Image (cartoon, coloured by chain):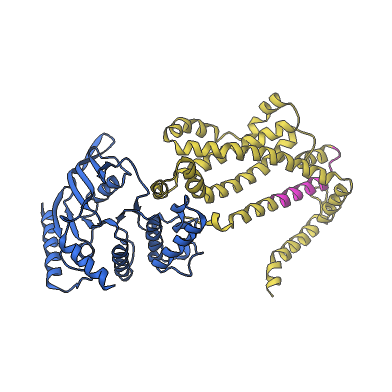
Chain colours: A blue, B yellow
Amino acid sequence: MTGTKSGSAVSTHSATAARPTKLRASGINKTFSRDGVVTPVLENVNLEVGEGEFLCLLGPSGCGKSTLLNIMAGFLDPTAGTVTVDGKPVEGPDPRRIFVFQERGVFPWLTVEGNIGFGLFRLPKAERERRIAHYVQMVGLQGFEKAYPQELSGGMKQRVEVARALAVDPDMLFLDEPFGALDSITRLIMRRELLRIWQAERKTIIFVTHDIEEAVQLSDRVVVMSTRPATIQTIVEIDIPHPRDLSSARYLELRDGIFDQIGLAHKI
Amino acid sequence: MKFLVRLRPFFFILLLLVLWQFAASGGHDHLFPTPVQVGAGLVELFSQGLLAKYIIASLFRVTWGFGLAVLTAIPAGLTIGWNRRLEMALNPLLQLLRPISPLAWIPISILWFGVGDMAAIFLIFLASFLPLTLTAISAVESIPPVFVNAGRNFGLGSWELVWRVLYPSVMPRLIIGIRITLGIAWLVVVAAEMIAVNSGLGFLIVDARNAGNRYDLVVAGMVTIGCIGLLLDTGMRSLEKIRSLRWTY
């Protein structure tokens, strides 16, 4: 346990320079056209994400950060620019990179077990069952294996979705405001859970949020995005080791710095 | 106690039957037969073997007409709903055909198939095809995109996506549509049998009137149609209770 902790502290301090690049987005532009009106959403976004990094995309609602996440995950094509993962261009969604929608993505016709095992259809039965059991336990849903999503709370559904994503052992997770629909207490618990899982499994995580506190609590770096058309306004490195003290001077300093950044963006 | 509560609707029906008996027996039984007369009519039909024969004839036609419609309309509707362009092309036609009563097709179906089972089956097929197609189209269009995206994300191929995401997504709506359409098919079979064939419950009603104004048999036929319609609907409702099909989003 202590080993994991100090390990993460070292990696957060050493930041991105030490990590090999996992994902690179270069010159990303995206425009949507509807009824002949062309709306630019993303403008010349350049971003590198290191292997095993926890990165937050932070910006006001509707700024285009979800669009950027969808492009990086391969669900949307950029109007211009390229995304590469491990040096290879992204050409569509891939089981090695799982997108976690809010709990809306849980399949309501499958049980907890069925959902967690959804992506394991190519594995032999015994291995599949072993993994389902492992991830049921990891997200603390023992006893709910046979339950259907409508019998679960929002937080439990969210855990099912995270477990379903982890079960296929992806290199990367894309999370799109995953805890946005949860109450504030559950949200805090889920953040801690996610950090615990991230430290245990060492996935590269890109996490979209509009919640400044959430971004500073979770990530190695916070990418602050401007309003539409979104560009990267600034990137803030969060050099506080986990577990983070939310009343420490450094935490408050970083948080307030981002508040100022967003505030400036609002005034313009 | 619980048993008595469950029996309440039956007591109520019994009460209505008694009221009906009193209302109709006061010298008006030439206008509407009494329940006793209707019961006697049912017994008469049953003992002649006609009741079973006609029920089977009607069910046979519904099974074929409705079954063929389910087998063709649902894949067609799912395909149309999945392809936006196809839907835009076909929608005006579907909307034009929709307000035409299936009974308006009776002359055409007799022209094509003659008087007989085929004409009746064709009518039931027509009556079921359009509502089922429209249900399937709207079922596909209401699938939340996250389900499809999640399916693709886990590396599902096209057929796996259809089988593991599309099919379970549309089932709840589809089952409701199938149940409602079966009700329509059962309405149409009676009408079709009045004109296009010489057997079945619809034929029984017309025949009983034509062959000597046997209104007791007419009402006996109506009661039978109602009971079987109720049974069909109950059967379909039990499908809706299946766990993995019952979810809604």
Tell me: A156 left or right of B137: left
Give the vertical position of B8 relative to B94 (above or below). Answer: below
Above or below B94: residue B30:
below
- x and y percent of residue A239 in the render? 15, 64
* Residue B104 location, quadrant: top right
Residue at image position (43%, 33%) is B88
Foreground of the two, B53 or B206 = B53
Q: Is residue B180 left or right of residue A168?
A: right
Observer-nearest residue: A56 or B19? A56
Q: Is residue B215 magenta?
A: yes
Residue A199 percent coordinates (x, y): 28, 64
Q: Quadrant of residue B17?
A: bottom right
Residue B210: say if magenta: no
Secondary structure mainly formed by the magenta segment: helix
Q: Position of residue B92 (x, y in %)?
A: 47, 31
Please tell me which residue is depicted at 48% across the width and 51% down the height of the picture.
Answer: A121
Residue stretch in magenta = B211-229
